[in-house]
Image (tube, grey):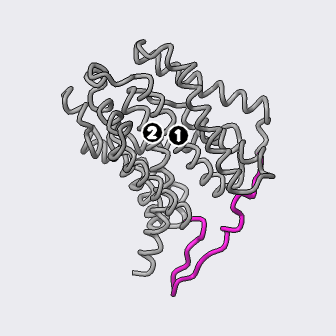
Amino acid sequence: MTNTLQYLVDGLSIGSLYALYALSLALTFSVMRLINFATGELIMITGYVLVVMSGLPLPVLLIVALTVTAVIALIIERLAFRPVRGADPLTLLVTSFAVSYLLQSVATMTFTSIPRSTELMSGLTASIKVGTLVFSRLNLVILGTAVVLLLCVVTVLKQTTLGVQMRAAAEDFGMTRLLGVSANKVIAVAFLGSGLLAGAAGILFVAQTGTVTPTLGVTPLLYAFIASIVGGLGSMLGAVLGGFGLGLIQVLGQVALPDNLSPYRDALVFLVVLGVLILKPDGLIVPRSQTKRV
């Protein structure tokens, strides 16, 4: 029972990061039907802000990192995606790839490909012992922060006018525009929220890894995409469930596999994902807009 609780907390901690990645991706997809591959680069940008501005007091540093990431997300929407908004979905996809590689190239030219280290939240490396259980302080902070952020997103979506407009746009964007809702405003808010979530996830990820590279966001983007697919592409709740599910499966694989098979842990995760998609090709939760199209 003790080991089970320990593994559960570890899995939820990893899964909470994946849930933040996935939700950041799902916000823009639900409104624009756009898989924004530049979401990974927003995480990378957050990392470099933390490195460059490391001399600032921690609260100020975190606010600056979140603000810069959110502003860049808005700039990307305005300069890259708004001009091609009515284009073919393939054009949007290519634009997304182009923005992603552009930001990676700019980071490489500016900071080189050599990893940059940071001691962000280094005081959280110690562990907390509760009876026979030993929890990493950082893992508990990651889990607690992610849960608070997810609750904030739910509150905004359900209790505010902008949130209701975003939910309506996710279900039927055309009808939402006919009712007088500004497309520019809704999409800008979606990108702003995506940027803030990516920034928060980037802060937690960098605190966990301690290093920043131009390709920092590639792995988080991969897990965000997988979690979104498993949860149901276009469903924000599904993205969150998919993220937590991936984290739990990953920890379970690490615990259950013998030592000689531990290098195949990720392969096990993807095998489970494949099995889920075979059983439920549309993901765990089918968005209402997709149900209507079906």
Residue situated in front as seen by the camera: 77 or 106: 77
The answer to whether 209 is drawn above or below residue 217 in the figure is below
**Location of mark 2 (residue):** 225
Quadrant of the rendered image containing residue 126: bottom right
What secondary structure is found at the residue carrying circle 1?
helix
**Location of mark 1 (residue):** 221
The residue at the point 52 percent across, 59 percent down is 145
Task: State the quadrant of the C terminus.
Answer: top left
C-alpha span from label 1 to label 2: 6 Å
The residue stretch that appears in magenta: 116-139
Image location of residue 105, percent across then percent down: 70, 27
From this viewpoint, is residue 274 visible? no
| Residue type pointed to by label 1 | Leu
- Viewed as shown, does residue 139 lie left or right of 281? right
Image location of residue 229, percent across then percent down: 37, 39
Residues at badges 1 and 2 in contact (C-beta under 8 Å)?
A: yes
| Residue type pointed to by label 2 | Phe
